[in-house]
Amino acid sequence: MTRTVLVRVLVVAVVVLVLLLAAFWAVQRRLIYLPDPAPVPAAASVLPGAVTTGAPPRSGGFATRTPETMAEDIHLRTADGLDLGAWYLHPAGRDPAATVLVAGGNGGNRAGRAPLAAKLAQAGLAVLLLDYRGYGGNPGDPSEDGLALDVRAAHRFLTEDRRVPPGRLIYFGESLGSAVVTELALEHPPAGLLLRSPFADLAAVGAESYPYLPVRLLLRDRFPVKEQAARLHVPAVVVAGGRDSIVPPSQSREVAAAASARLVEIPGADHNDPVLLDGPELVEAVLSLVPR
């Protein structure tokens, strides 16, 4: 091979590499965030009880009470002007033992978390199921900064509208949502923090899926869960699957150690197995954080 041919081959290889990296840079958020953007049904059709969107919590509008819980369709206003749909469950006719702010993972929408919310409500807890921008019919496009604004809108609703005291507020983060609530906890510490299948940081878990790319150099969103968890001083529980094929269990263990959290590792459980979605171990882990 002559020098001229070799130079041409190297130039082509460099151009191809640059194009691949540019393509990854351009589409990376489509690979990270996998929302179901379809509008979700009214809470009343999925969860026990019903209150019209925007109605007062215990009076006004149309309301059908059940012996256990009530469900509301609510709207959250973000600091950058988006209106996000969400669901709020609370016990009918009594105060909840605590309120759980649920931040979902990178896929689906809040309808997929309805069984978890129903079980927590049956245990006497109020639950806010948040959908991020771009999820569940909500406007906007997801990003690390955007999700931080979204979860703060949910926090404001609970603490200002429903006047939930911080000492009765629990954050629940599912996978990517673990990063969202961990960052929130630095600014607004809760009574307890439940992290389900957390990763150390987005680059660390991204490298598992794309080992051939310099993920850490290319990522626009970082989500440094382990680093932020180490700065927290709140009761915390980490729940992980022993055979998680998306977030390595070793990363969840690292987060648990950094946060000085109790680790609940479920043997044989993969990332989206039912036991990690709304299983008894997960529900019990949340209840263990309820202030006594």
Image (cartoon, rainbow, N blue to C red):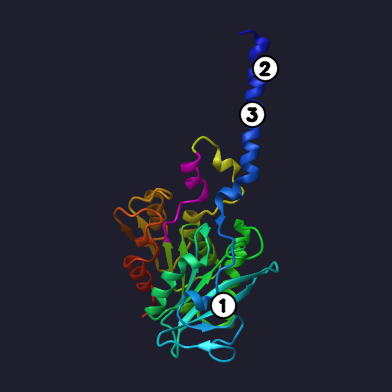
**Residue 152: x %, y % from top left:** 59, 69
Residue that carries the numbered disc 1 in the rendered image: 73
- Report the span colored magenta: 196-210
Residue 198 located within the stretch drawn in magenta: yes
Q: Which mark is residue 8?
A: 2
CB under 8 Å between discs 2 and 1: no
Q: What is the quadrant of the C terminus in the image?
A: bottom left
Going by the image, does 246 lie left or right of 29? left
Residue 4 vertical placement versus 164 (above, below): above
Label 2 to label 3: alpha-carbon separation: 12 Å
| Residue 88 visible to an observer of this rendering | no
Going from N to C along the chain, the mark reached first, 2 or 1, is 2
Disc 2 marks a residue whose amino acid type is Arg
- Tag 3, which secondary structure? helix
Residue that carries the numbered disc 3 in the rendered image: 16
Going 68% across and 11% down the picture, which residue do you hit? Answer: 4
Going 63% across and 18% down the picture, which residue do you hit? Answer: 9
